Image (cartoon, grey):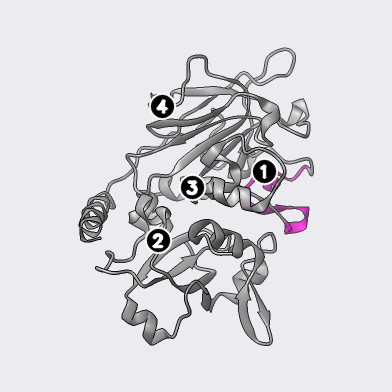
């Protein structure tokens, strides 16, 4: 255990040294929100309503009740038949982690996932609804920012995207657990998991357009700073000796180094359920707090934010007390393997 803590402390200090560095970032499509005076929504492809905001991130559809994990970027150029000719390109240097070349195997259609191991935390980016994946692209390949991953299109599984609404679905986010198959099997979906840990149900995004605009304006230099600025919707505590692999993969999200022995956690979640700030608790702190093993307790809740964002259910009130909602329960099941 001490060896694990020592290695983890080294990782914590190493990622902390990256915090002040400005990441290099390339917009993943030709139609960029760079031109002065042009609203960012002009780059977004609407989802059928005619409102560009429906191509944005969050609860932007069905009157705010339907959640959209990424952003949908319009193509700029089309051929005579009306099909996009633009290439989707890697937003940062990274490693190809997943390629789904068969459109019918996912609602994403054809998609590619990159992991960006040289930034902190090591976010993924996802490029979906591709008409074609770049020939020769293979899992494990290193890719440079600006290199093409595929051609923007309208591929999808289980539904049809009209030609005029072809777009690049783009995500930036974090992967919940390497033990995703256990959670997937426990849910008894009745279908095979075709995408291993890079299944969309194991990926949680942030607002890619918001990150880009804040980064471009100089408000944040990197992802660590961006995550630190997220407004918390819920904070909870849990008594457990488990150190989720989420924490070991993203040590930049720790608020302080791990103690010699972990007795539990206080975790802050943004309104989507993304666990963006982790504070380890010692066994003595857990005893003082009278926490019961594997029984998470909400200690703070941002009621206006929770009520405003209707596409996610993180917490609900029962008899005046906050209880864990369905979406937050799913995240906790993935992170801690609790029922």
Residue receiving disc 2: 228
Answer yes or no: is residue 314 visible.
yes
Check the image and report above or below for 136 versus 36: above
Please provide the residue range marked out in magenta.
50-65
Image point (22%, 53%), residue name: 7
Is disc 4 surrounded by few (<14), some (14 to 19) or many (20+) residues within 10 Å?
A: few
Q: Secondary structure at mark 4?
A: loop
Q: Quadrant of the N terminus?
A: bottom left
* Closest to the observer, 112 or 35: 112
Residue 266 percent across, percent down from the top left: 42, 72
Residue receiving disc 1: 55
Q: Is residue 324 left or right of residue 91?
A: right
Q: Secondary structure at mark 1?
A: helix
Question: Disc 3 or disc 2, which is closer to the eye?
Answer: 3
Of the numbered discs 3 and 1, the one sitting upstream in the chain is 1
Of the numbered discs 4 and 2, the one sitting upstream in the chain is 4
Q: CA distance from mark 3 to mark 1?
A: 22 Å
Image point (59%, 43%), residue name: 200
Residue receiving disc 3: 175
Q: Which mark is residue 140?
A: 4
Check if residue 52 falls in the magenta segment.
yes
Check the image and report above or below for 190 versus 245: above
Check the image and report above or below for 80 versus 270: above
Q: How many marks?
A: 4
Question: Disc 1 or disc 2, which is closer to the eye?
Answer: 2
Q: CA distance from mark 4 to mark 2?
A: 30 Å
């Amino acid at each position: 255990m001490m060896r694990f803590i020592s290695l983890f402390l080294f990782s914590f200090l190493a990622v902390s040294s990256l915090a002040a560095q400005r990441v290099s970032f390339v917009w993943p499509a030709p139609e960029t929100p760079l031109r002065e005076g042009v609203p960012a929504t002009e780059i977004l492809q609407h989802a059928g309503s005619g409102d560009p905001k429906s191509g944005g991130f969050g609860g932007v559809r069905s009157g705010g009740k339907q959640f959209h994990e990424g952003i949908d970027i319009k193509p700029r150029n089309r051929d005579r038949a009306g099909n996009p000719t633009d290439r989707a390109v890697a937003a940062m240097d990274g490693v190809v982690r997943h390629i789904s070349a068969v459109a019918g195997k996912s609602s994403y259609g054809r998609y590619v996932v990159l992991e960006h191991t040289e930034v902190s935390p090591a976010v993924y980016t996802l490029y979906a609804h591709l008409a074609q994946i770049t020939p020769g692209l293979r899992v494990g390949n290193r890719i440079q920012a600006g290199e093409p991953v595929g051609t923007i299109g309208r591929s999808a599984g289980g539904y049809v995207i009209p030609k005029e609404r072809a777009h690049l679905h783009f995500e930036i986010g974090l992967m919940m657990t390497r033990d995703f198959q256990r959670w997937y099997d426990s849910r008894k979906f009745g279908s095979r998991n075709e995408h291993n840990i890079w299944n969309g149900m194991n990926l949680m995004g942030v607002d890619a357009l918001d990150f880009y605009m804040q980064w471009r304006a100089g408000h944040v230099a990197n992802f660590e700073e961006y995550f630190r600025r997220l407004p918390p919707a819920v904070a909870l505590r849990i008594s457990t000796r488990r150190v989720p692999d989420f924490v070991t993969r993203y040590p930049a999200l720790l608020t302080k180094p791990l103690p010699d022995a972990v007795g539990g956690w206080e975790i802050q979640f943004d309104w989507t359920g993304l666990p963006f700030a982790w504070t380890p608790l010692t066994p003595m702190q857990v005893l003082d707090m009278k926490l019961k093993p594997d029984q998470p307790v909400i200690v703070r809740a941002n009621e206006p934010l929770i009520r405003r964002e209707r596409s996610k259910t993180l917490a609900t009130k029962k008899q005046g007390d906050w209880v864990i909602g369905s979406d937050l329960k799913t995240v906790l099941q993935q992170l801690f393997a609790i029922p």
